[in-house]
């Protein structure tokens, strides 16, 4: 099958990584690049093997050769670029965070309804593509765990390397939504939405955030004006409660811990392709026996597959006329949680997500 012809908007760090992983067997190929920075556009176009370079992304959207766009610009540009792309008749794979608010997801969905043949997905779905995530999803949907009442999701990452530099937009909440919350949070929540399926019905959020701080005079995070930690309780319509915690750059070790507990069995698993628990651990008491642990033979997540999942999933979905693993319905829930988390952190009150 012919690869889907993508135009890339935004030729920065992640676009370079993604495009460098595409090869002749991929279901996607890059036929055009747009960036306001001509050198960046030139460099990425050379990697992609195309000479179609545009300074203005509207020109790329007018290029009939382009079937779909991969949007890899700073987050505040995602909504206008996605809507412009849909109006120009292009499918969209957008980097995470998809947008900045729940209302922005609804605005995009309204335009998508005018062009229902066009598919939109977000790279927050990147971590769906692991054996452990798929197996956990199947076990939960199949009732193996019984009624799932509790999810504990805790991810802690280490301090930034001394001298790490970030582009300015990463230190401006108006441009990126927040710090670690909007950087890693979309992955956390999209992954939870994927493994929990219909059980993921977030309704009430009570949460806190706190900003990055210098660990020492030498080890200063590159973005001090945005959050570097969050902790939230998420209560779902069905009574399931989710503890969601993410912390970065603190005086403590990295930690990756996901526990899913049901009335019949529990699961421990990894979210990232790193950490102690690379496999899927299944726990259950049976009869009078001591608790039984079964390590399910699921491969640890592969990094390149994870990185490329959303783009290749969209390409496959276009070729096969099927849905992508990440859905707009879940983006509404994810950004509902973000809206509520920020309001809860500000007001110190629990916040209800609109139905
Ligand atoms: N850096 C990473 O490791 C990483 C990983 C996963 C996802 N992401 C996400 O990808 C997106 C981009 O991140 P990045 O780190 O590559 O950023 P970056 O700053 O390296 O690159 C952004 C690019 O967008 C270009 N740009 C800005 N305004 C534009 C416009 N109006 N039209 C066309 N191009 C424009 C910039 O010139 C720049 O080349 C963000 O949403 C980020 O969260 C980044």
Image (cartoon, grey):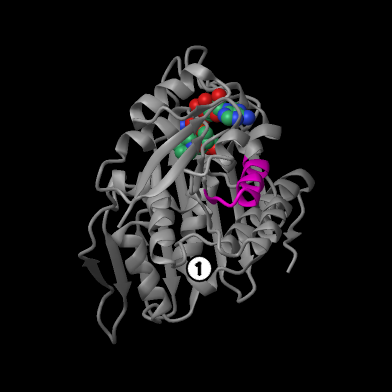
Q: Is residue 183 above or below residue 120?
A: above
Q: Residue furthest left?
A: 297
Stretch of the chain drawn in magenta: 78-92
Q: Is residue 29 left or right of residue 187?
A: left
Q: Residue furthest bottom?
A: 287
> What secondary structure is the stretch in magenta mostly built from?
helix
Q: Position of residue 8 (x, y in %)?
A: 48, 37
48 in the magenta segment: no
Question: Label 1 neighbourhood size at 10 Å, few (<14), some (14-19), many (20+)?
Answer: some
Element assignment for label 1: strand
Find residue 110 and report its image quarter.
bottom right
Name the residue at 59% across, 44% down: 230
Q: How many badges with numbers are in the image?
A: 1
Name the residue at 66% across, 37% down: 76
Q: Viewer-proximal residue, 279 or 250?
A: 279
Q: Position of residue 222 (x, y in %)?
A: 54, 21
Q: Can see residue 256?
A: yes
Q: Viewer-proximal residue, 63 or 112?
A: 63
Residue at the spot of label 1: 150
């Amino acid at each position: 099958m012919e690869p889907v012809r993508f135009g890339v908007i935004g030729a920065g760090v992640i676009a370079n990584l993604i495009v460098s992983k595409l090869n002749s067997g991929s279901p996607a190929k890059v036929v055009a690049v747009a960036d306001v920075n001509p050198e960046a556009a030139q460099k990425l176009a050379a990697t992609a093997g195309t000479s179609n370079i545009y300074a203005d992304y509207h020109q790329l959207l007018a290029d009939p050769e382009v079937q779909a766009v991969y949007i890899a610009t700073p987050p505040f540009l995602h909504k206008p670029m996605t809507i412009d792309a849909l109006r120009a008749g292009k499918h969209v794979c957008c980097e995470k965070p998809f947008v900045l608010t729940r209302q922005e997801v609804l605005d995009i969905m309204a335009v998508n309804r005018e062009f229902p043949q066009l598919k939109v997905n977000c790279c927050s779905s990147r971590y769906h593509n692991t054996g452990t995530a798929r197996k956990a999803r199947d076990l939960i949907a199949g009732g193996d765990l019984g009624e799932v009442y509790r999810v504990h999701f805790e991810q802690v990452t280490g301090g930034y390397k001394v001298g790490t530099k970030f582009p300015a937009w990463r230190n401006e909440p108006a441009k990126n939504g927040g710090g670690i919350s909007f950087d890693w949070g979309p992955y956390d929540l999209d992954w939870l939405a994927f493994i929990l399926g219909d059980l993921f019905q977030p309704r009430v959020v009570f949460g806190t955030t706190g900003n990055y701080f210098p660990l020492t005079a030498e080890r200063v995070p590159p973005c001090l004006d945005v959050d570097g930690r969050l902790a939230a309780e998420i209560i779902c319509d069905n009574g399931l409660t989710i503890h969601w915690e993410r912390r970065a750059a603190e005086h403590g070790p990295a930690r990756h811990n996901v526990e899913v507990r049901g009335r019949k069995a529990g699961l421990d698993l990894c979210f990232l392709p790193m950490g102690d628990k690379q496999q899927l651990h299944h726990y259950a008491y049976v009869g009078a026996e001591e608790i039984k642990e079964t390590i399910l033979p699921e491969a640890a997540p592969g990094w390149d597959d994870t990185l490329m999942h959303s783009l290749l999933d969209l390409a496959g979905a276009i070729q096969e006329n099927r849905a992508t693993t990440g859905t707009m319905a879940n983006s509404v829930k994810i950004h509902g949680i973000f809206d509520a988390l920020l309001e809860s952190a500000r007001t110190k009150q629990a916040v209800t997500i609109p139905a």
